[in-house]
Image (tube, rainbow, N blue to C red):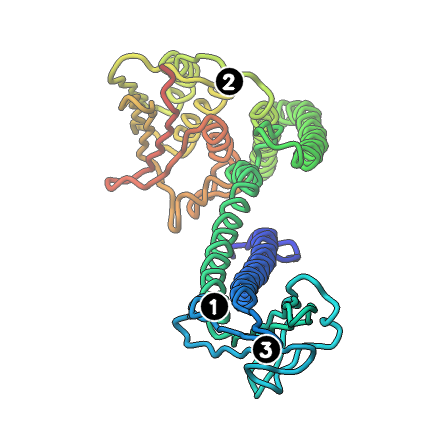
Amino acid sequence: MVRKPYAAPSAGSIHRRMVLSHLALGALASLCLFLAIRFVAFQTAEATQDNLLRAAANAIGEQISSSGEEVIVKLPHSAFAILETPSQDRIFYNVRLNGVSITGYEDFLPPEETSRLREPFAFAASYRGFDLRAVVLNTSAPVGSEQQAVSILVAQTQYAQGEVADRFAAWAILISAGIFLGFAVLGVLATSSALRPLHRVTEAVARRGPNDLRPLKHPTPVELTPLTSALNEFIRRLRHSLRRTETFIAEAAHHIRTPLSTVQTETEIALRNSPDDATRKVLRKILFSVEESARSASQLLAYATVTQRSDSTPLERVDLRAKVQEAYDALYPTADLKDIDIQLQTEGEGFDIQGDVLMIEISLRNLIDNAIKYSPPDTTISLHLSSDGDQHCLTVRDQGRGLGQGDPQKLLDRFQRGSDTAGIVGTGMGLAIVNEVARSHGGQLSLKNNKEGGACANLCFPNFP
């Protein structure tokens, strides 16, 4: 059964929160800009209309004259030309002398409080169902020997003003929409940029193997320093705990091997000296169990050594061809005792790799010893060392029982043995040790059955130029 990675309870997406925050800020900024532009446009259009109304009122005031006791008001064409608009706004006016209308709309009157003002005064008005913008100008005209008060009221509907304000509002909507979209794009880009270091840290941790407990040295922003520091401290404690466990396993294996060696020696002596077949049969079973236990202790010690050195020992240049030759020379006598012929072939030049010498030696010996263990007498084991430029590979082929049924790669796990290994001393740790060494060096170990029988193991390491 494949276990799914543990997933912590989700507290929502930081990316979504940041993007939504930028969108909310963009919406608020766009709304404020729209209201500001609309307000300024309305005020500007209103001020422009007020100025035109003042100019029209002044033009009318300049044409007021008197003849004896009579006041003459000539409405100049320029006064109304000033107020002409494409919207066909209506114009209303009223000229009064001492509060009595002398021309214009008699019932169109300014507010009473404007009668004391000496400067043109603009205000909003309503007349005959129209919303108007009006200006009242208080002046005087000579009538006979006296100056008489004259009030000039000019007003205009606001259709043109509304159209100008609407055009500005339309532009304001477009500008606000553009700003909102800009905030959205910048929000996504800024959020992605801000979270990119966090994604790099996540990827750096996710790419690591299950036994890679090196400190995280990936450059991070100041805001992520507490996280990486806490993570490195956790890794340090975990590495220390694992080392203590591995040290305990190694010490236990060492202490177990010593008494087992004594038991094995005494059992072998008893086996040689015992004349009874039944006793010899029992002694052989004891000797087989002792050998299996001793091998287990040795393999546990080797595995603990490999896992302990994989993350802590500095790597150096290693001549893989020389190490294969050393393993060949060391194990050839063992193979010869079983009448097994080992043939070593090398193709190419320059088999340097970067690695830990002891770990490389342990992996090569385990790989070749595994082939010897499962090969019957009078067979051949082929060792073929080759290089393709990017990696160097040692291929070991035997004529033994093969890997059995099922997926051969599962035999790379600890304590896993093939389906046809009965009667052969083994722990299921040899290939796991080789695979651990390959993994820690950036290489790989692959297994398959030979078509003509037996097993084939291919151990590869990256080239070190």
User: Residue at 55% of width from left, 82% of height from top?
Assistant: 104
Percent from the top left, x then y, of residue 265? 62, 22
Nearer the observer: mark 1 or 2; the answer is 1
Give the label, 2 or 3, closer to the camera.
3
Q: Which residue is mark 1?
A: 79
- The percent position of residue 20, horizontal first and vertical second, equals 58, 57
Looking at the image, residue 223 sits to the left or right of residue 331; the answer is right
Is 399 rendered above or below residue 104? above
The image quadrant that residue 444 belongs to is top left
Of residues 409 and 99, the one nearer the viewer is: 99
- Residue type at mark 2? Asp
Is 333 situated above or below 208?
A: above
**Residue at the spot of label 2:** 356
**Which mark identifies residue 70?**
3
Amino acid type at image mark 3: Glu
Q: Where's residue 262, x and y in %?
A: 67, 23
Residue at x 59%, y 58% (from the top left corner)? 36
Q: Secondary structure at mark 2?
A: loop
